[in-house]
Amino acid sequence: MVRTTQENILEKYKDYIEFNALFYSKKGLEYDDVYNQCYLFLLENNPHSFSSTELKRRVNSDLRTYYNHEIKERHITYGTNPENIGL
């Protein structure tokens, strides 16, 4: 059976993806959404072009941006101010 590049990436970074999904789910995002976003960010950053450390640095930056955007959208949607609720 021939494995695709995407399957290899998922296998290699599975623990990293799960760690981030769990981390951000504890901060209020959906586990599956973060898992999928992390995987997409890995693919978008072309894992073959960077060292593992540089790739994780880039994905972490993308995840922080994603988290900040999602939290901001929630506050706009629900009319809450993060400064008033201690975030």
Image: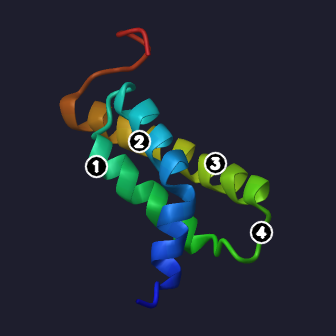
Instruction: Check disc 4 and give the amino acid type.
Output: Phe
Residues under labels 3 and 2: Cα distance?
Answer: 14 Å
Q: SS for tag 3?
A: helix
CA gap, disc 1 to disc 4? Answer: 26 Å
Position of 86 relative to 57 (above/below): above
Q: Name the residue under label 4.
A: 50
In the rendered structure, are the residues bearing label 4 and label 3 in contact, judged by CB atoms less than 8 Å apart? no
How far is the residue under mark 4 from the one under mark 3?
A: 15 Å
Q: Name the residue under label 3.
A: 61
Foreground residue, 7 or 70? 7
Q: Residues within 10 Å of mark 2 (few under 14, many from 20)?
A: many
Q: SS for tag 2?
A: helix
Mark 4 or 3, nearer chain start: 4
Mark 3 / mark 1, whichever is N-terminal: 1
The quadrant in which residue 54 appears is bottom right
In the image, which disc is placed on residue 21?
Answer: 2
In the rendered image, the vertical position of residue 29 relative to residue 46, given as above or below: above
